[in-house]
Each structure stands twice: as structure tokens, then as C-alpha cells.
Amino acid sequence: MRSRTPHLRPPRGPLALRHPRHRLAATGIRLLGRTTIECCVDEYAAAVAEALTALHATVADGEGGDGEPLVLDLFCGSGNFSHHLATRLGVTVHAAELDPAVHDATAHNLTRVGARTRLYLSDYRDLLGKHPACGPRDTYFVEPPWGPAFTPAGLDLTRTSPPVPDILDDIRRARAGLPCLVAIKTNDHIAHDSLARSFAGHRHLRTITPAATLPHGANMDFHIFRLDGGGGR
């Protein structure tokens, strides 16, 4: 693997979770149990966005990197990751959320904080179909529901819902083989080398590893890959 970002400082939690519930009610922020649990620590999301900013800067002008990149969050959830990507990259992030209750709460919260996220109640494949490739700096954030991917051996990315290899194939088809960046969130206990297997034939660029604060298997890692025209299954 090419690059590994040093451990970040201990987390302070998602912005919304730093305040008592009565103060949240006063701001109009709506919290759902599922999205509160899955919500990414703000500092982690910001670190990934900063890494992507640095990687975007390495794309030469001759590679078609002059215009605003397309940035898609394929499984939006709480929306805080989309919010940080949009803020740090200075772009509009297009995001999909399939669960109507989560979509409505997230859309409300994104509006309250003035986020530059355009949220759609849709499947990620519909989002891919609506937004054709712009250039090699285009970036896709991937965090499908883990559910059946939790196994005694660790997190098996070939068993997420949908499986990560299937998602990558859908991205490649939507782009007609044009290269792009993919950022993926995992835990720190990957089963059966499934991260490397899922991205076989593509180039690992960076891993962001926050300081471990929970038992092994419950901490987060973030990985950025260059999805090239080849690879896949």
C-alpha cells in the first residue's frame, strides 16, 4: 500500500453528539438511532476530505482535471460525510439514501446546517445513472450497510449489502471505463483479505487510520483507491 496517514487525535464525536439533547432540539436537528450510531466522527470525515483534496491536486491539467469534479456519496446515511466532503472540496456532493425515514431526517438536517449536499431518495445505481463522468478527479464515497458482512473472521466486504465488488463494477460501468477515485470506510478487522480482493487490479493511494479508541474490530479505517479502466471481475 502506497501511503498511510498517521493516527489522528482521539475523537470528539460527531458535531451533533457533542451537545445535550435539549440544545439539539433547539437547533432543529433530528437524530435517528441508526444514523446516530453510524455517524462518522467529524475529524475523521474532515481528514478523508483533506486527503482527497491533496490527491485531486496531483491530477495534471492535461488529464482533464480543470473543471469541478463529480463527487457522489452512494450511501448517504446521516449526511455528515457528504457535508464535510462538500465543505473541504468546495463542491456540491450528490448523495443517495434509499430509506425514506433516514432520507427525510438527513435532508432536514442538511438544510439546517446549510450543507452543499444534493440528496436524492434513490438507489445508488439510479444516482450513478443521473451523473455521468466529468473527469479523473471524480470521487465516489462507498459505505454500504455492513449487516451480513460481520463474520467471526472480521468484516467481509464481499458480503455487504450490496457487496463492495458489485458496487465497484456498477461504478466502472457508469463511467465507461474512465478512471476515478473511490473512498471506502471499513472497520479495523477485515476478513479474508476482502478489501484487497474487492479492489484487485486497482491502485491503493492512501489509508487514513484514526487512533483506536474501541476494541479491535470496532474502530474505523478509510481507504482511497484509484479505480482504473481495467480491473474488476
Image (spheres, helix red, strand yellow):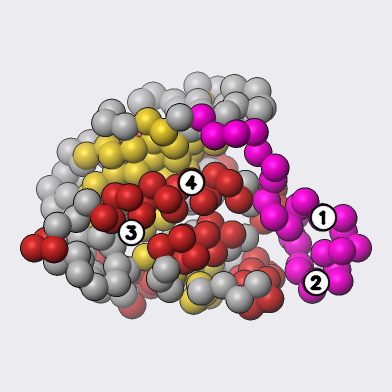
Secondary structure, mark 4, is: helix
**Which residue is disc 2 drawn over?**
27
- Would residue 24 be counted in the magenta stretch? yes
Give the residues drawn in magenta, as a range.
7-33
Up-down: is 68 above or below 17?
Answer: below
User: Mark 1 touching mark 2, by CB under 8 A?
Assistant: yes
**Label 3's element?**
strand
**Quadrant of the rendered image containing residue 210:** top right
Q: Earlier in the sequence, mark 3 or mark 1?
A: 1
Q: Residue at x 42, y 68 (%)?
A: 90
- For the residues labelled 4 and 3, the Cα–Cα distance comes to 15 Å
Task: Decide which of tag 4 and tag 3 comes sooner along the chain.
Answer: 4
Determine the CA span between mark 4 and mark 2: 26 Å
Left or right: residue 75 compared with residue 225: right
| Pair 3/1: label in front | 1
Element assignment for label 1: loop
- Indicate whether 231 appears above or below 101: above
| 3D distance between C-alphas at marks 3 and 1 | 32 Å
Residue under pointer 4: 47
What whole-number distance in Å separates the C-alpha atoms at marks 1 and 4? Answer: 22 Å
Real-space CA distance between mark 1 and mark 2, rounded to the nearest whole angstrom: 10 Å
Q: Is residue 23 magenta?
A: yes
**Residue 35 versus residue 2: which sits nearer the camera?**
2
Mark with earlier residue (4, 2): 2
Query: Which x, y percent locates residue 26?
Result: 86, 71
The residue labelled by disc 1 is 19
Local crowd size for mark 1, using a 10 Å CA cut-off: few (<14), some (14–19), many (≥20) = few
Q: Is residue 156 visible?
A: no
For disc 3, the neighbor class at 10 Å (few under 14, some 14 to 19, many from 20) is many
Task: Identify the residue at image location x=76%, y=67%.
Answer: 30
Q: How far apart are labels 2 and 3 at the CA level?
A: 31 Å
